[in-house]
Amino acid sequence: MAVPSHIARWDLDKTYLRTEFDTIRDLVKTALERPDEKRTNPGASTLLREMVRAGVSVHILSGSPEQMRRRLEDKLRLDGITWDSFTLKPNLQNMLRLRFRALKDQLGYKLPALLRARTKSADHAGREGLALKETLVGDDAEADAFVYSLYGDICAGKVGEDVLVAICEKGKVYEDVLEEVVADLRRLQPREIVERVLIHLERQTPPDDFRIYGARVVPFYNYLQAAFVVYEDGRLPAEAVLRVATELVVQHRFDGDALARSYLDLGRRGHLRGTGETVAALGVALASWTDREKVPGAIELQRMCEKLPAHAEAARKSSRLAEETPMPDYAKLVTAHNPRKKKK
């Protein structure tokens, strides 16, 4: 079995899917929706398909209950998505064990799942698997930025066992889950494996709220922005970015200026390197694509490509990627790590 070039771990609700679950009525409606009724966030399915096409190993990690597996998998199949693993939350099991706190908790669910997946992938893929880097995609409706950042720093060896225990205890993680997390930590070989944490701003949280986690965490408003980041990291070809942009033009009425502003916004916030080569490659890819076939929205894509060199220069001046950010005080942040709890 070939070792993939990269790993992407995707959340579903409010990240890939446009899901509402703030009320009981929302939950019931979501549970009863047919796969063809579920709505995808603009550009998300195109980006995910392009990542798979580029050889990225996709792993789904969602807080949706296990009982929704069939409908969620059918939805992804309708969208032409393939995946390597699909993990859902065992809410029925939690209820039967009277673990009601676990129904909404993300730290005690996603962190163990991430560490378990990492140790298993390393076991199966051997030395090459140990070096595989990851891009994590989540949203601002739950605790994704907190949990993903913590996971990255655990894998890098920056969070020791004592600190991890203190974080989990303050986060009210169940004792047996804590034991599992510690066991996985002991099995890890410290490596910088989390390349980027992409946070979809579904709730329009101010991007500056995430600066505490450093430049590795990238809050984004639309999936073209996510595509720009993954492309700059060398995980996507240039044409893949153009395909995401095409969806936004054709299906969501973006024009060339709006596409270019998506890049400019990321650049001003310091999340791009702004290299001239990557920007130029987009124009070359567009010319090659239009030579082969008629490209929907090609005029707007060309307009975007014309504006990007100037925006790239601004991105280079604002880039934060070389900055060293102090590790967040996870033990202090953990008490308010879930935005929905905080809002309540």
Image (spheres, helix red, strand yellow):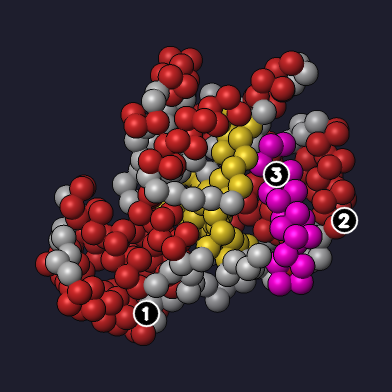
Say what secondary structure mark 3 lies in. helix
Which residue lies at the image location 77% right of the left edge and 56% below the top edge? 119
Other-residue count near label 2 (Cα within 10 Å), few / some / many at <14 / 14–19 / ≥20: few
Three-letter amino acid code of the residue under disc 3: Ala
Residue 321 marker: none
In the displayed structure, 222 sits above or below 37; it is below
Q: Is residue 269 left or right of residue 61?
A: left
**Prevailing SS of the magenta stretch:** helix
The label on residue 278 is 1
Name the N-terminal-most of marks 2 and 3.
Answer: 3
Measuring from the top left, give residue 24's x and y in whole percent: 48, 15
In which quadrant will I find the N terminus?
A: bottom right
Above or below, comparing residue 59 to residue 110 in the picture: below
Which residue position is annotated with label 2? 186
- Range shown magenta: 108-129
Element class at badge 2: helix
In what element is the residue under mark 1?
Answer: helix
Q: Amino acid at mark 1?
A: Thr
- Please state the total of marks drawn on the protein image: 3
Relative side of 192 to 243, left or right: right
